[in-house]
Amino acid sequence: MKKIALLSCIVFFFQNALATDLTDPLEWPMEIKTSEGEITLYQPQIEKFENNRMEGRLAVSVNTNGELLFGAMWFEARMETDLDKRTVHLIKMEIPNISFPNVEDQAKINKLRNYLTSQIESWNLTMSLDRILGSIENDQYLQKDEALINNTAPHVLYRTTPTVLVSIDGKPITKEENGLEYVVNTPFFIVRENNKKVYYLNGGQFWYASEKINGPWSESTKVPSNIKQFAEKMATQQEEQDQDSLANTLSSAPAIVVATEPTELIVSDGKAEYASIKDTQLLYISNSENDVIMELNSQIHYILIAGRWYTAPSLESNEWKFIEPKDLPEDFKNIPNNSDMASVRVNIPDTPEAKDALLEQSVPQTATVDRKTATVEVQYDGDPKFEKIDATKVAYALNSDKTVLQIDKTFYCIDNGIYFESTKATGPWKVSTKRPDEVDEIPPSSPVYNVKYVYIYDSTPEVVYVGYLPGYTASYVYGGVVVYGTGYYYQPWYHHYYYPRPVTYGFGIHYSTYGGWGFSYGFSYGWIGWSYHRHAAWWGPCGYRYGYRHGYHHGYRHGYNRGYNRGYAHGYMAGRHNANRNVYQNRNNGVRKSISNRPSTNDRNLNNKSRPSTRQNNVMTDKKGNVYQRDNKGNWNSRDNRPSNKSGNRPSTQPSTRPSNKQQLDRSYQNRNRSNKNYNNYQKQQRSRPSNVNRGGGRRRR
């Protein structure tokens, strides 16, 4: 009779609790106070997620009149993700099952489950992405390898003095304007007066002159006034003028290297200085911003470029070769996670950092698109020109400022992660409700390969639910690690206008645990915070136009390990607001990025009684619904709600017997702790971000 009375109270509790707001904070366990007692919700355990749907379970405890009852609750929900804030909103939740072990009154449990199911949409549950990734129990959600990625090494240059790599997209293309001729297929400002021999290049406070675009370049103090005025005009027309303040601290001009093919630059501050990596037979170059490691036994150098490892016998070598991630020396896995080179662990297969990155590749950025108001404008340089992609039924527009596909008699424009369609190449366009299957045939050798990572999940007469995986912003998987870019060089379009294609090399791309993909310009010292050119499309890594910053000797390795404030306050930005930024945030018409952008159903609630619990986050359930609590000695105690003993008291926990699934419980508990650590580190990093920085996320890099 006591159990029946308790279950009746549970229903009453939830009727009151469902009127509370579960959106904030993100701490677990979550405690819900009612007039009759308290309910504790423990950190969810994720069983499955696919597209924008998630399934999982969580442990629940109900405390009333001195009685404590434990149970398991399964849930299904639609995800609305905000990868910038690293949060996931679970909406339209359903409760397919709820279990209180060894409680026989199934009718009461069914009543509770039915009530939860009918009321659950009033929940606005927010979870940390880091905690979700750490709660996933099945490795099947790791992204699969992309076998056709091109890993051929770019041209690698090594310098021992401050040097800037000026990348040009193939053979220089020039355009005349106001009596001047400037190079359009580079983000750098290179210009000369018509019929004059001397070109001028501007970066930060320095001007350079050369009779050839490819150099050699030397510093110049005499620059024609009309060229200076033109540079100011071009710069002020950009959306952002966000140069790194460190660029203005240089006392002398760095050297210039011009590249017209995929090239990467390694720079050390003088002769390379090697330092040991603890507990390994590895050395790293301590006076360089590049990730360069040397194995002592073989004397082979390893450099990390765009998530890929390349080897050579010396830094000066012209024969860098790609090495499969699985073939890296075993000692790479022994690099301590608190060392100056800890950041490279994400690109070493089978490390926890690599696994987290692979899991994150499976999480989509989602948005809700209003079918009536969402629009797109497509421009062509002349009449539309399409080229068929080999071995597919897909053709793509060569001369458009957007990605436009032709499949049979239908045209699709994929813009900012949204599919639009039309019966004509020029429109009018409407939001698509079905993703064409043919896009899955597009190979990485095609410049429009990234659109295969854009999805349509569902639709109503009013809205379309869409999302994209990191592949849309050039983040891919190869050999058990994440890499940036396909590695292919794509020919740009140029007639009256220059339309660039995605690039992989030339910008020092690297992966940051808290910021995604970021990039630098070698020793550019934040030379250029924006592109000078007014192209509808922009050449460089995705997000180039918003600019990254970095400063040599001011962050990354030492900043990462010696304090987040120091590491973030200096150096360059490496954040998902840039190279891996949320593209939905750039559309203001008809796109709702996340649930946080609309009024919550909980706004009308009068009282918010939910709060973080003071209980330990040490209660978990297995897949059968059994509930276990871990003690300080690492033992798992069953919380199975067995009847009271003869004295009328029910033991708070059962004897510390070894559960048959102890190994799985231990692994889940370890993952939970690691994910909570990642969440806390991310929050710490966010709090330490300087107030004068208005873009970028994640840690900075030296």
Image (cartoon, rainbow, N blue to C red):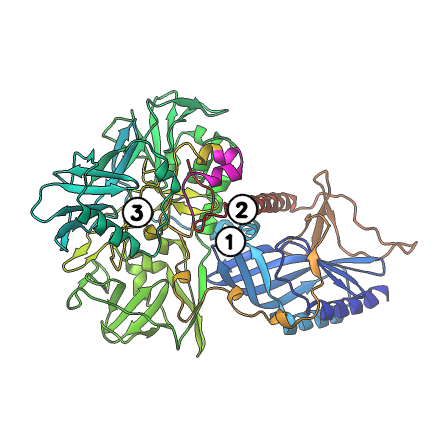
Quick one: SS at disc 2? helix
Residue at the (60%, 68%) spot, across then down: 94
Crowd rating for badge 1 (residues with CA inside 10 Å; few <14, some 14–19, many 20+): some
Q: What stretch is highlighted in magenta?
A: 559-575
Q: Does the magenta stretch include residue 665?
A: no
Camera-side residue of 25 and 197: 197
The dot on residue 86 is 1
Q: Mark 2 points at which residue?
A: 682
Crowd rating for badge 2 (residues with CA inside 10 Å; few <14, some 14–19, many 20+): many
Q: Which amino acid does label 1 sit on?
A: Arg
Q: Which amino acid does label 2 sit on?
A: Tyr
Camera-side residue of 37 and 682: 682
The dot on residue 149 is 3
Among all residues in the image, which is located at the extreme top?
A: 297
The picture places residue 349, in percent across and down from the top left corner, at 43, 39
Q: Nearer the viewer, mark 3 or mark 1?
A: 1
**For marks 2 and 1 on the same chain, the one whose residue lies earlier in the sequence:** 1
The picture places residue 690, in percent across and down from the top left corner, at 50, 45
Quadrant the N terminus occupies: bottom right
Q: Can residue 320 be seen in this view?
A: yes
- In the picture, measured across the screen, residue 238 lies left or right of residue 360, that is left
